[in-house]
Amino acid sequence: MALTRKQKEEILASVKKKLKDQKSVIFTDFTGLSVSNSSSLKRKLKETDTEYKVVKKNILARVIEDSDIKGIDVKDFEGSMGVAFSYGDEAAPAKIIYDFSQQKDVGEFKILGGILSGKAISADEVTALAKLPSKDQLYANLFAQINAPVSGFVNVLAGNIKNLVYVLDAIKESKA
């Protein structure tokens, strides 16, 4: 059943809003993806405040033309187009989609490219983003680096106190 003009305009407005509100967008080719795998991917993405939608290339191309995003032409992408709109952590959906694409039973599912901070990025850049450590890991590394000098200082002070105790003990033994 064909969509009416009003329905098409509503879809266009919805995609414009999603593109405007997003922190990152990832374009995928979901050719050969089963319904159960698609549902599994959507569930995982939903946990990270990411919405995965099938969007027609013509609609997406019109929305991108109207936006400030340059350097991406979705009409050049082949296959069926799935789009992940992330409203939370920018890298989390890239990690989930990359891990998902590495599974054996996902057909020809692959990453086509994306948008990060209003700039177009290639599939290789999305993959590089997916391989970065998570925010929690980066925070843990940062705090470990900040804490390292303090820990070293405490160990030096503890070593001096231990040496003082050994000297006092040696003096005590020599007088006894």
Image (cartoon, helix red, strand yellow):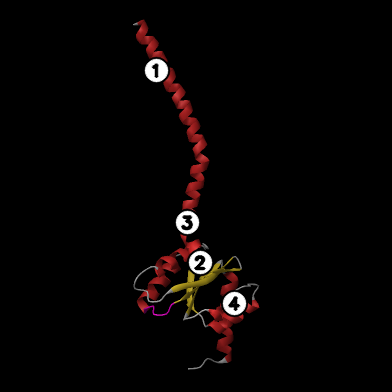
| Residue position for label 2 | 124
Q: Earlier in the sequence, mark 4 or mark 1?
A: 4
Q: How far apart are marks 2 and 3 (CA)?
A: 18 Å
| First of labels 2, 1 by sequence position | 2
Element type at mark 1: helix
Please indicate, yes or no, whether residue 36 appears anywhere in the rendered image.
Answer: yes
Instruction: Tell whether label 3 touches label 2 (CB within 8 Å).
Output: no
Q: Which mark's residue is nearer the viewer, 4 or 2? A: 2
- Percent across and percent down for residue 51 are 48, 72
* Occupied quadrant, residue 106: bottom left
Q: In the rendered structure, which amino acid carries the disc numbered 2?
A: Asp
Residue with the mark numbered 1: 166
- State whether residue 73 is above or below residue 146: below
Residue 80: give x, y in percent of width and height. 46, 81
Give the residue pinned by disc 4: 16
Q: How far apart are marks 4 and 1 (CA)?
A: 73 Å
Classified by dominant secondary structure, the portion drawn in magenta counts as loop
Amino acid marked by disc 1 = Tyr
Read off the magenta span: 30-34
Residue labelled with disc 3? 134
The residue nearer to you, when weighing 75 against 89, is 75
Q: Residue furthest bottom?
A: 1
Distance from Cα at disc 2 to Cα at disc 1: 60 Å
Which numbered disc, 4 or 2, marks the residue that appears first in the sequence? 4
Cα–Cα span, label 4 and label 2: 25 Å
Query: Is 104 left or right of 27, judged from the image as shown?
Result: left
Q: Residue at x 44, y 66 (%)?
A: 98
| Residue type marked 4 | Lys
Say above or below: 144 vs 163.
below
Q: What residue type is labelled 3?
A: Ser
